[in-house]
Image (cartoon, grey):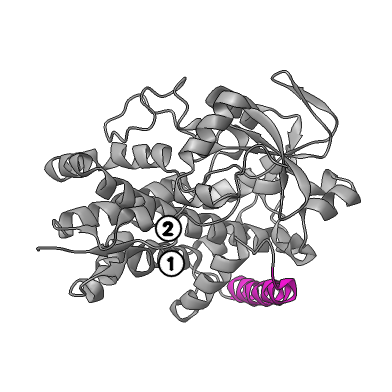
Amino acid sequence: MNRFDPWGEQMRVDPLPTLARMRAEAPIVRLFNPHQSAPEWRVTRYADVVELLRDNRFSKDKRKLSDAARSRYFRVSEFDRLDKHMLYADPPEHTRLRALVAKAFTPRRIMELRPYVAEATERLLDPVERQESVDLLDALAFRLPIAVLAQLIGVPVEDQERFREWTRILIAPPSEGDFDALRRMVIEFQQYLEEFLALRRRRPRDDLTSALIKAQTQSDRLSSVELMSMIFLLIAAGFETTGNLIGNGVWALLRHPAELRRLRTTPALIEPAIEEVLRYCPPVKNSTGAFPLTDVEFRGTVIPAEELVVASLLSAHHDEAQFPEPDRFDITRTPNRHLGFGLGLHFCLGASLARLEATVAIGTVVRRFPGLQFAVDPDTLRWKDGVFVHGLEQLPVTWGVR
């Protein structure tokens, strides 16, 4: 029986009290995931999380695990053709993949998207402006990232809704449920990507996909499977996380009216405000898992080989040893060494794109709707269930007096 319950209902209401107890009583703790019946370690203190994210004794590559370990932690084998990307790779393979992708995913390419992000934000808000209330997640937060990704990757506009549905399910598959249906969806998505990549090889355009196809370092290119995996990673990492960042940011500002007023008075605070959102309510609550390939002593605790280890970023961000008054939302907090985009080798390559979208989207909402407020009692809102992503199920708002 778990002493703590990171999967319980309380975590969907307010996860911070449970995480505070874990930091105080068992900062490195072995749990049993009830959905997998497999051991899982949680690391919750900031200093320990930083050490874990930098420790190369823990592997991201599931191919290095035994068959028994893989079967415990990975249930849908059809994902194998979508996970040959740098998030699930160790050096030197990670180094090779990141170098190739970085050649295509340039700061210039991201900054060129700013006018499109601004136009798309206004376009999405226009039709809902006169509605009495809207779910901001559905109206903006999750529509904007998929529109931007489609523009960046070169996906046809008519496929955006299909991409949205595929991505929503594939990056957060059910822990229990119809795995046959999930497998069929994975295969359907793979078939689409194969046809899309074949089209871009024949007819390259000025988009990221074409740039990835052309990317080359010392006569090395991304293979077909690696290309498909990288497109999937960009979609998965850029959709749910950025949508949560936008939604969490608006939620945090509405929960702290004084900070919202500060931002309205001084719009230039939008950039540090986004950094505080990334700390206070990050769009990713836990790191992707890693595995020691042999027994490892970590910060005085022996972690057995091939047992999943997860860093709790949300907990680390509320560690009073690192952040003074960690449960206070302060859009001018400095220093603010949050881990919202990870750390070290696996620092998020799309951090600049996520920051751009959140800055434009939240800044536009705050400017355009001075009467913005919750449309329901905020205490009734629930956080999504899931291991990695951290976001609300819904965010009903009303525009108030305009």
Give the residues in magenta.
Answer: 177-202
Give x and y (percent) for residue 76. Answer: 76, 64
Give x and y (percent) for residue 185. Answer: 67, 75
Check disc 2 and report the residue beneath it. 243
Q: Quadrant of residue 257?
A: top left
Along the line of sight, the residue nearer the viewer: 206 or 39: 39
Q: Amino acid at mark 2?
A: Gly
Left or right: 313, with 38 as reference point: left
The answer to whether any part of residue 357 appears in the image is: no
Residue at the image point whose x is 64% and y is 63% from the top:
173
Left or right: 23, with 319 as reference point: right
Circle 1 Cα neighbour tier, 10 Å, few/some/many (<14 / 14–19 / ≥20)? some
Circle 2 Cα neighbour tier, 10 Å, few/some/many (<14 / 14–19 / ≥20)? many
Q: Amino acid at mark 1?
A: Gln
Mark 1 against mark 2, which lies toward the viewer?
2
Q: Secondary structure at mark 1?
A: helix
